[in-house]
Image (cartoon, grey):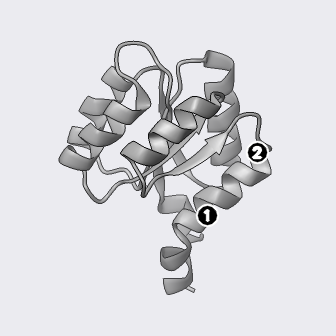
Amino acid sequence: MTITNRLRILLAEDEEAMRDYLSRALQNAGFDVVAVDRGTDALPLLESEHFDLLLSDIVMPEMDGIELAQRCNEVSPRTKVMFITGFAAVTLKASREQPQAKVLSKPFHLRDLVLEVERVFEDRLHATV
């Protein structure tokens, strides 16, 4: 068993097909994934459970991914943040508001997503080898 089996990812994605697709890909790569369809559902989980990564769409109803990331920084400061979006202008806003967060633009290959997630945790992955 590798450390990736213990890395927990909270996925916030409002589009059901994309949410299922990403969840399955990350689980197949060995990550523990909890998926929700909106930021307002993700926030209580961040407050009550430990997650290593928040992987969030930026454009979502009720609470967008940038606001969710800001709230995540408050309630779970050790959780890393990665955004996914299909909008170039939103990518620029995310980069300004959350400069430490990685932004993946849709469309992307699942392999690229898994590589980026692994890159975020590179230090931890190598520390246990």
Q: Give the residue number, with chain letter if any, for mark 2.
A: 110
For residue 113, side relative to residue 125 (left or right): right
Q: Amino acid at mark 1?
A: Glu
Which residue corresponds to the image point at 75% horizontal and 53% vertical from the top-left? Answer: 112
Between residue 33 and residue 71, name the one nearer to us. Answer: 71
Q: Give the residue number, with chain letter if any, for mark 1.
A: 118
For residue 77, side relative to residue 95 (left or right): left
The quadrant of the rendering that contains the N terminus is: bottom right
For residue 3, side relative to residue 74 (left or right): right
Mark 2 falls on what kind of element? helix
Residue 40 against residue 112 in the figure, above or below: above
Mark 1 falls on what kind of element? helix
Residue 10 visible in the current orientation: no
Q: What is the number of callouts on the image?
A: 2
Which residue corresponds to the image point at 46% horizontal and 37% vertical from the top-left? Answer: 93
Between residue 44 and residue 69, name the one nearer to us. Answer: 69
The quadrant of the rendering that contains the C terminus is: bottom right
- The percent position of residue 73, horizontal first and vertical second, equals 26, 48
Residue 72 against residue 14 in the figure, above or below: below
Q: Amino acid at mark 2?
A: Leu
- The percent position of residue 31, horizontal first and vertical second, equals 57, 53
Residue 88 visible in the current orientation: yes
- The percent position of residue 11, horizontal first and vertical second, equals 50, 36
Quadrant location of residue 115?
Answer: bottom right
Residue 23 against residue 15 in the figure, above or below: below
